[in-house]
Image: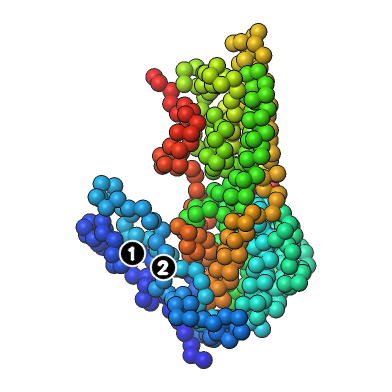
């Protein structure tokens, strides 16, 4: 078999820095910049290729166009203003399209796989693990597949769990992760030593922003040691705080689960005199769950997220708004993301330092604080009127469930897309949907990019239009 260099490197990664502004404003192939993807051949130049075994799989009949080539790309941006009023990004960023390649860089019988889950739970974790195992086994004939238990620390402190399709066949029905997860315990050298000692040559790391930052370090160390080991990240973020990809698996399930809490809050509020239903939803630094749950509910009067400052008292404040809603409707429903309003809640010195095992700041309970402030406000301003606040905190109920149908489909596609990329020799990458199409994105780029709610785009305007809530801009 011929010795092959990374086919993408030579042809498609030319710099496009020196364009004129006219060229920058027009979308042509010459103004598209393909994001370079690390490949094992970047540092192991004599790797052999072999035909994709799907070629001989009795259930597959690869037709023309079945295999994805290095020139198949997904554009990052799909909305453009052709009048040129707003500058379009230049160059137009593109990523390699996910999918099977005609040549692969791994001999299936010598492939040894590790799969690990880290960070908080997310609906669909078990489905992704299941699909990785079944996909590697059925599509590529890989037989040595192991689960690393208890997150990153499991690499060096636990025996790997051998996985096969029979063992994982019903895992998609279970919430959580059968492999178990944890926070903290990231010891780079011990992890890479364990990967080397146990002979793993493909490592699939499923986790959120922290996990992906750890995966970048693992990839860099593997690169430094020049090991024939591919590292792939699969973004898992129920909060949807990881950038570039459309969203994570599990996010839609969490939004759907949140409806039960909002419905209950609405029933309680409607059934009381001057009733307020208050729901706190997950969202440490981003308010996507609260935002999407609000948009899909129609019963929410006000949505508070970390990206939008708010205040309680005075003109244009939350209390004035709620006073009016209670006068108009007799009840109101408030949805608050857990990371909202944190700077308004008094913190003692110990609470200022309080971090979880991974170093994430431990948040104070914004729902409990809001309830108590609401009660104080009402008894001060309306001492003789009935008032009720029913506070619902569904916390883990929105994430400790199996994925819904849409998220399950996502889990299958992301698992298979990642397997195809790894078998093709890509490493240090993440697979995820960009504008609905699965793409391969450099791990480092994803790990560095946060996905905050853009309060200047249409989604936040939709929230304002369904709730008619204040913008909390103080008039001077
Ligand atoms: N900057 C970092 N470098 C190396 N490892 C990290 C880094 N940040 C976090 N980790 C490790 O990644 C793992 C998961 O991190 P974390 O608990 O922050 O969850 P996460 O992946 O961000 O998921 P989520 O935000 O959904 O809970 C932990 O083992 C943690 O030690
Ligand atoms: O209690 P745990 O497991 O640390 O997880 C809580 C955090 O995890 C997240 O769900 C992110 O995964 C946050 O929304 C939440 O603050
Ligand atoms: Mg995180």
Front-most of 125 and 259?
259
Q: Please give the name of the residue rendered at 60% of the width and 45% of the height, measured from the top-left corner.
A: 255
**Ligand 1 contact, mark 1 (Cβ < 8 Å):** no
Please indicate, yes or no, whether residue 327 appears anywhere in the rendered image: yes
Residue to which mark 2 is pinned: 73
Residue 220, position as x, y percentages in the image: 55, 66
Front-most of 326 and 379?
326
Residue 94, position as x, y percentages in the image: 40, 63
Few, some or many C-alpha atoms within 10 Å of disc 1 (few <14, some 14-19, many ≥20)? many
Residue 322, position as x, y percentages in the image: 55, 21
Front-most of 367 and 386?
386
Choose top left, top right, bottom left or bottom right for residue 402.
bottom right
| Quadrant the C terminus occupies | top left
Label 1, secondary structure: give it: strand
Answer whether labels 2 and 1 touch (C-beta < 8 Å). Answer: yes
Please indicate, yes or no, whether residue 287 appears anywhere in the rendered image: no
Which numbered disc, 2 or 1, marks the residue closer to the eye?
A: 2
Above or below: residue 267 compared with residue 443: above
Residue 69, position as x, y percentages in the image: 44, 76
Q: Residue furthest top?
A: 384
- Left or right: 216 in relation to 179: left
Q: Please give the name of the residue rendered at 69% of the width and 39% of the height, measured from the top-left corner.
A: 394
Q: How many marks?
A: 2
Q: Please give the name of the residue rendered at 75% of the width and 60% of the height, measured from the top-left corner.
A: 178
Residue to which mark 1 is pinned: 32
Above or below: residue 416 compared with residue 348: below
Q: CA distance from mark 2 to mark 1?
A: 10 Å
Label 2, secondary structure: give it: strand
Q: Earlier in the sequence, mark 2 or mark 1?
A: 1
């Amino acid at each position: 078999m011929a010795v092959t260099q990374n086919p993408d490197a030579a042809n498609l990664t030319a710099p496009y820095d020196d364009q004129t502004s006219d060229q920058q404003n027009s979308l042509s192939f010459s103004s598209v910049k393909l994001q370079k993807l690390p490949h094992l051949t970047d540092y192991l130049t004599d790797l052999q290729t072999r035909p994709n075994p799907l070629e001989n799989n009795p259930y597959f009949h690869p037709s023309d166009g079945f295999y994805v080539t290095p020139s198949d790309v997904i554009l990052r941006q799909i909305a453009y203003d052709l009048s040129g009023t707003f500058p379009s990004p230049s160059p137009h960023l593109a990523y390699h399209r996910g999918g099977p390649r005609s040549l692969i860089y791994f001999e299936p019988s010598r492939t040894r796989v590790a799969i690990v889950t880290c960070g908080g739970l997310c609906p669909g974790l078990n489905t992704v693990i299941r699909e990785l195992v079944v996909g590697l086994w059925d599509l590529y004939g890989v037989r040595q597949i192991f689960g690393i238990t208890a997150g990153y620390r499991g690499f060096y402190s636990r025996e790997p769990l051998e996985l096969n399709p029979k063992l994982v066949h019903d895992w998609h029905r279970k919430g959580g992760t059968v492999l178990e997860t944890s926070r903290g315990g990231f010891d780079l050298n011990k992890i890479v030593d364990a990967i080397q000692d146990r002979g793993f040559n493909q490592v699939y790391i499923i986790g959120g922003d922290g996990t992906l930052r750890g995966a970048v370090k693992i990839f860099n160390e593997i690169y430094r040691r020049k090991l024939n080991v591919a590292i792939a990240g699969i973004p898992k973020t129920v909060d949807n705080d990881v950038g570039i990809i459309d969203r994570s698996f599990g996010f839609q399930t969490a939004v759907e689960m949140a409806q039960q809490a909002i419905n209950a809050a609405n029933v309680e509020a409607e059934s009381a005199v001057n009733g307020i239903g208050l729901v706190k939803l997950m969202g440490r630094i981003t308010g996507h769950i609260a935002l999407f749950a609000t948009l899909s509910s129609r019963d929410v009067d006000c949505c508070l997220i970390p990206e939008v400052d708010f205040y309680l008292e005075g003109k244009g404040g939350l209390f004035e708004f709620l006073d009016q809603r209670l006068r108009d409707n007799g009840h109101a429903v408030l949805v608050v993301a857990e990371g909202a309003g944190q700077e308004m809640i008094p913190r003692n010195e110990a609470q200022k330092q309080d971090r979880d095992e991974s170093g994430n700041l431990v948040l104070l309970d914004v729902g409990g604080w809001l309830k108590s402030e609401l009660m104080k406000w009402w008894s001060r301003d309306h001492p003789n009127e009935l008032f009720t606040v029913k506070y619902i905190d569904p916390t883990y109920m929105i994430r400790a469930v199996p994925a819904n149908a849409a998220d399950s489909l996502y889990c299958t596609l992301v698992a298979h897309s990642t397997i195809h990329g790894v078998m093709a020799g890509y490493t240090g990458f993440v697979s995820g949907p960009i504008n609905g199409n699965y793409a391969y994105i450099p791990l480092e780029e994803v790990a560095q990019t946060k996905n905050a709610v853009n309060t200047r785009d249409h989604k936040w305007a939709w929230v304002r239009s369904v709730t008619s809530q204040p913008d909390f801009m103080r008039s001077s």
